[in-house]
Image (cartoon, rainbow, N blue to C red):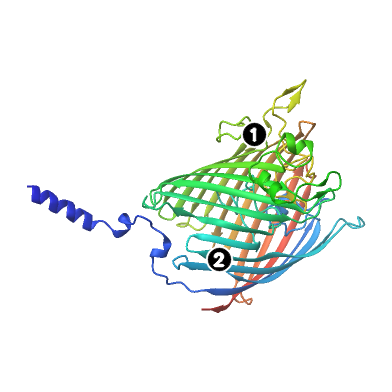
Amino acid sequence: MKNKCLYSILLLAVSLSAEAWNWWPLPMAQPDTCRDSLFYVGQIQAHASSGAQAPSLMWHNTDGNISRQPYAGTFSAGILKPATRPSRWYDYDFGVVLNGRFGGGQPGSGQKDITGYFSQLYAHVRLYIVDITAGIRPQYWGAGDRELSSGSLHFSNNAHPIPQISIGFERWTPIPGLFGYAEVKGGITHGWLGDNSEVVKGTLLHHKHIGGRIGGKLPVNISYEFHHMAQWGGYSTVYGDLGNNLSAYKSTFLARSGGSMQNDQLNAQGNHIAFQQLALDIKGEGWKVSAYWQIIQEDGPIAFIGTTMNRRDGLWGVSATQNHWPFIQGFTYEFLHTTDQSGPFHDRDGCVYGGADSYYSNSIYRQGWTYFGNVIGSPLLTPDNSRVRAHHAGLRGDIYGFRYRAIVQYADYYGRYSRPEHSRNTAFLLEVKKQVPKAWGLDFGLSLSGDFGSRYGNSFGAMVTITKRGLITQW
């Protein structure tokens, strides 16, 4: 009997797949069957609107590439080499894309928007599990469906990509010895917010993050991320040198007091934002449902999500994707609430309450959490109007080769505690794209969008897009 039990145990061990006993299941353990490719891309866009500016959903979350002027156009051209070989011990990608943007206001307004810039100019290399990136690279931080989301609360794709250098673990990476059921990711970034605002020039960016996920190959995964961002350094026309040396960087890194100004000595050097995200993923063969909760803090002490002073504020979302039925491939719903802000008073009658958080704004970095005029986080919040309650829903799919995206949004804006004002906006976007092989493989797109309400005024607009992509070479 004893020998039969031992034989059964050995038989079970042998019958289990090798993957189940892989103590560190990295992609590099699989055979590398992919190839490297170099592509070209060119695009022309033009839009016209009836209002004082283009409808909000037409230029929100476009990496700052679409002008908000009512009449505008954009062209871009570049080459891209994507990272395509996760099973190799190293991988790399780069992009060089030049953009030109021009626009104008209503006839007779004299408004113009003419600019040229690189929307991508970066190189990234992965050495085993470590990622190193330098340059201008579009990135999106946040759970859910990027195409349908209203935008993450810390880094969305609303503003131009920020020039930066970073090192870390970009992908969820298994912890050695836990068979892939526990994973981590994280990194540190130094960036240059060189948009030269009228008040502070040469602002620097600090960003570090860490996250953990449990579940691995199981159908249910739970993840948590913490991000610390700060605007620091630069030269103010009001306060002078804001601290650009190693000592100032250390104070910013540790979010501690420093510098020569009373504000930085009483609080922390720089403009700091803490971001937390808790997400639940349920997945199966060809489908996935994600629920996520995001919060930001601009005052200490930092506490776990759900226990902060401003716990009533946040973004709650659910996203579903599937690839079995093409007509509806993705659905997203999000609710944004930022009207609490830890209460209406920061201090009063000698008592410090810690409220009136006024997200994305700062008394020294008066441009706030923006880059080239666009909010870096959620476009629904602005430094001068950060108390918002909004509902946002989106749908996307493919109907016989016509790829569509439909978004509706309703938002109430309440200004700031120091300057309360109420406005509202109802917005919609309907976008359809179709690749036509007989027309040199061009991809044609048409977008219809509109705003209705007192926030932006009534506006209706249409945008036409023509895109050409192709393979240059492969090796």
Q: In the image, is residue 449 above or below residue 345?
A: below
Foreground pick, 389 / 453: 389
Residue 337 lies, in percent from the top left, at 65, 36
| Callout count | 2
Instruction: Depth check: give the residue in front, 331 or 86.
Output: 86
Which residue is identified by label 1? 300
- On the picture, is 137 further left or further right than 219? right
Q: Which residue is mark 2?
A: 125
Q: Residue at x 40, y 54 (%)?
A: 285
Whether the residues at callouts 2 and 1 have beta carbons within 8 Å, the answer is no
Q: Residue furthest top?
A: 349
Image x and y of residue 326, in percent: 50, 58
Lateral position of residue 283 relative to residue 451, left or right: left
Q: CA distance from mark 2 to mark 1?
A: 36 Å
Q: In this orientation, does residue 428 appear?
A: yes
- Compared across the picture, whether 92 is left or right of 150 comes to left
| Residue 98 location (% of width, % of height) | 72, 68
Where is residue 452 shown, x and y percent of the image?
75, 44
Q: Earlier in the sequence, mark 2 or mark 1?
A: 2
Residue reaching furthest to the left: 1
Tell me the residue at 38%/64% (across/down): 29
Kindly identify the amino acid type of the residue bearing the numbered disc 1.
Gly
For badge 2, the amino acid type reads Val
Q: Which mark is residue 452?
A: none
Specify whether residue 423 is in view: no
Few, some or many C-alpha atoms within 10 Å of disc 1 (few <14, some 14-19, many ≥20)? some
